[in-house]
Every structure is written in structure tokens, then in C-alpha cells.
Amino acid sequence: MNRRVFKRKMYQKMLEWKHSEQGGTALLIEGARRVGKSTLVNQFVSKEYKTAIIIDFNLASEEVISLFDNLMDLNFIFFQLQRIYHVQLFDRQSVIVFDEVQRCPKARQAIKYLVADGRYDYIETGSLISIHLNTKDITIPSEERRLEMLPMDYEEFCWALGKDVTYSLLRTAFENCYPSVGAHRDSMRDLRLYMLIGGMPQAVDAYLTTNNLQVVDNIKRDILNLYAEDLIKIDKSQQLSRLFMAIPAQLSKNSSRYAPTSVIEGITFDKVQELLHDLADSKTINIAYHANDPNVGFSLNADYKRFKIYLSDTGLFVTLVFWDKNFTENVIYQKLLSDKLDANLGYIYENLVAQMLRATGSKLFYYTFPKDNRHNYEIDFLLSRGNKICPIEVKSSRYHSHTSLDVFCDKFSNRVGQRYIIHTKDLEKDGQILCLPIYMTEFI
């Protein structure tokens, strides 16, 4: 049975590339495995080109791979590709796709010469594509336009559920500071459904097909196992996979940073940075760095020794939280969906907010400062808007105070713009604080 092809915002970005570049660059779409890269590219090339040759380097024959060993005669290469794939290519009307191009580094290196030739467009997709194991022996082409593909964001998830109008109305409510009133309960249920299923297209499709969250959980476990296998291939010591698998435990401690030495005893800072670089390149995580001096231009004052790690997909995160079970029973999912599970869900909502902020293109930063000798104030996320910074606190339940936010805004009053609390209640104003339901996070 064919899986659904979901509407993705990346399609429009690809269309803009095609029209603006006119073959002047190749398009490289990076993203974690199972995020929907190949499906989207197949949809795009079938609609936007007269013909396409799609080379899946997971399946390509030695005959195809060997074509990129010698680039002296491009006419010969194009002739052989047309013969092997039974597709005729037309100047400026055809595209050649290198799917999972990291499997054939020489094909990626060839992009420089293929683009210069100018006859056809080129689209590459890849997972873990920039990790040194896949690129150490080649020259990275400068003729690439890179786009990062993330899991389906909340709006795309609503499109998949057929709730386009609902999402548009939520945006209108945000822009006018209207409470959702009667719609809030249903909106929170949809948001929690997104939290549980996540934005991996295969998981969303499984839910729409079966309406069974246990089936969805099995799909997510398969994806996490694929990630674990990839990470072990990169780092046979398994330190990389251990850092990845420990993400929920580290967030649940509610500490001000990820503590690598509590996961891998005696690990050095240099080794942590190397592993963190590889994890970031895998596109399976989002990293928030501590901003030592919270001001516009957070990267200038980021502390790369202090960071938090989130999974790029909260649906996968929820499954990883319950990894100790063979499967996450439907009863757990139903309790999570109805917000009745006896557990502190703050760190799950925090992961979700991180994912939703990243979906809007925001880099992630946070800030802590001393409260007393044993405790810190903490601002969960900091955004830069114009020449001001916008602090965000995330609350998973009914909040009674927002001391950290208040003290922070007093401390940096001349820098602070709009201040936010993201919580599970409806939109409301609390003095200068705009309190938003979590489903409005992407509107900030």
C-alpha cells in the first residue's frame, strides 16, 4: 500500500531555488533519516521537470557508481545514465537526483563540473552527509545550495489532519491576542497528539491509517534503532549513541546543562565537542547553548561548554523516554494525550517548544544566573527580535509564579522586548508578559 505524500513547506523553497538559480547551483537537501527527503524530491521532480533520473545510491549498481570515477567525458556519463535508467534527458528541462549521495562521495564531488556543464539541474539528498567519514577524501563543491529539512512542523501536521482552517484561526487569534476560549481544549488535544506522534512522515501516516498509537510507537522505535545503528557506524566506541540515548534522562534532571561526564566517565571537553559536532551533523538533535551575556547576537557570547540537547522530533523523544519498555502501551499514550499521566512532563514540553522554535528558523539559546549559593534562575529560551531579546519560560502546568522571568527582565530591562510564558492554558496577558498556549509557539 502506498504511503501518503504530505504537503511540506520545503516544496516552495525548492521551487524558488529552481526558478532563481536556473541551474547555477545544485540543491542539497540535508536531514535525518526518515524525515521525508526522498519522498518530497520524487514528488517535486515529477511535477516540475519534463524528465528525471533518480539515482538512489543505496541501490545503485557498480556500473553507475563507477561512472563518477572519470569526469573527462560528460557526454559519455549522460549517455550511460539514460541507457541504464531508460530516461531521456532534455537540456534545461531535466533533473538528475543523487539520493543518499553520501554513499557515493565522488558523485558529490562531481557536482562542480556537472553544474558548470549547465545542461541539467541537480538535486542531492543525504543523511549524516557532512560527517568527516563521508567527506574526508573529496573536495566539497561550492556550487551547492543547502536546505535543511526538519520533521513536519505543527502547521504541516495540522495540514495532514485536515485542519488547515483551525491553524489559520489560531494564527489570527495570536495576531489579535484573542483567547481561543471554546477551541482551547481541542487545540491542546491536537497539540498533545503532535507531541506524541511527532513529525516523522511515516509515523504520521501510520496514525492516519490505523488510529493506533501503539503502531505509531513501533514505527518510531524502528526509526530510533536506525539512528542508533548509524551513530555506532560513525563511532564504534558507542560514546556517540550513549550521549544520544541519554537525552531524556539529562533533561528530566532539570539541570542547567547536559552533563556528558555523568553519561561517559572521564570524557574530555575536546572529545565532547567532537561527538557533539557529529550529533549535530546527524540532524537528529537540536542544541541550545548558554548565552553568557544575553544580547542581540547570541552566538557572539555563546558558551560552548554549557549546552542542552533536545531531540529534533518530540514524537521520537516520547518513545525514547519509555525506551525501557518493549513498547509504549496505548494506555500510556492515552494518559499523555489526556494530560493525566502521573509524571512531570515539563521536559517533554520543553523539547516540543525547542522543536517548534527551530521549525521557525530560530537558533536555540538559554540563560541561567545565580539565585543563591545552591539555586539558579533560568530562562528556557532566548530569541532575538530586531534590536531586542525576547525571553521565554516554558510551563507544563498551571503556573503560580514566574520569578525567573521577572528577575531577568529587571536585570536586563533595556534589552528586553516582548516577554513570553508558554504554557498549557489559553492565551492571556499577565502584566507585560504574554502567556501563550503551546500550540501558538510557532507564531512568535
Image (cartoon, helix red, strand yellow):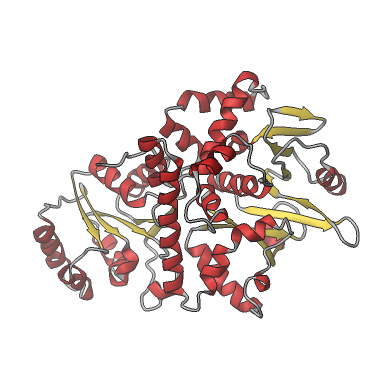
Q: Taking 43 as reference, is 86 above or below it?
A: below
Residue 67's x, y, as percent? 18, 70
Q: Residue at x 65, y 76 (%)?
A: 269
Q: Quadrant of residue 3?
A: top left
Q: Of all residues shown, which one is farthest toward the top?
A: 182
Residue 183's x, y, as percent? 59, 22
Q: Taking 84 as reference, is 105 above or below it?
A: below
Residue 139's x, y, as percent? 37, 74
Q: Quadrant of residue 128?
A: bottom left
Q: Residue at x 75, y 53 (%)?
A: 295
Left or right, residue 425 beside residue 277? right
Q: Quadrant of residue 234?
A: bottom left
Q: Nearer the viewer, residue 224 or 303?
A: 224
Q: Of all residues shown, which one is farthest toward the right?
A: 372
Q: Nearer the viewer, residue 363 or 250?
A: 250
Q: How many marks?
A: 0
Q: Nearer the viewer, residue 236 or 26?
A: 236
Q: Is residue 297 visible?
A: no
Q: Residue at x 54, y 37 (%)?
A: 334
Q: Nearer the viewer, residue 140 or 134?
A: 134
Q: Is residue 351 visible?
A: yes
Residue 399's x, y, as percent? 78, 37
Please state, as top left, top right, bottom left or bottom right, where the C terminus lies in the image: top right
Please state, as top left, top right, bottom left or bottom right, where the N terminus lies in the image: top left
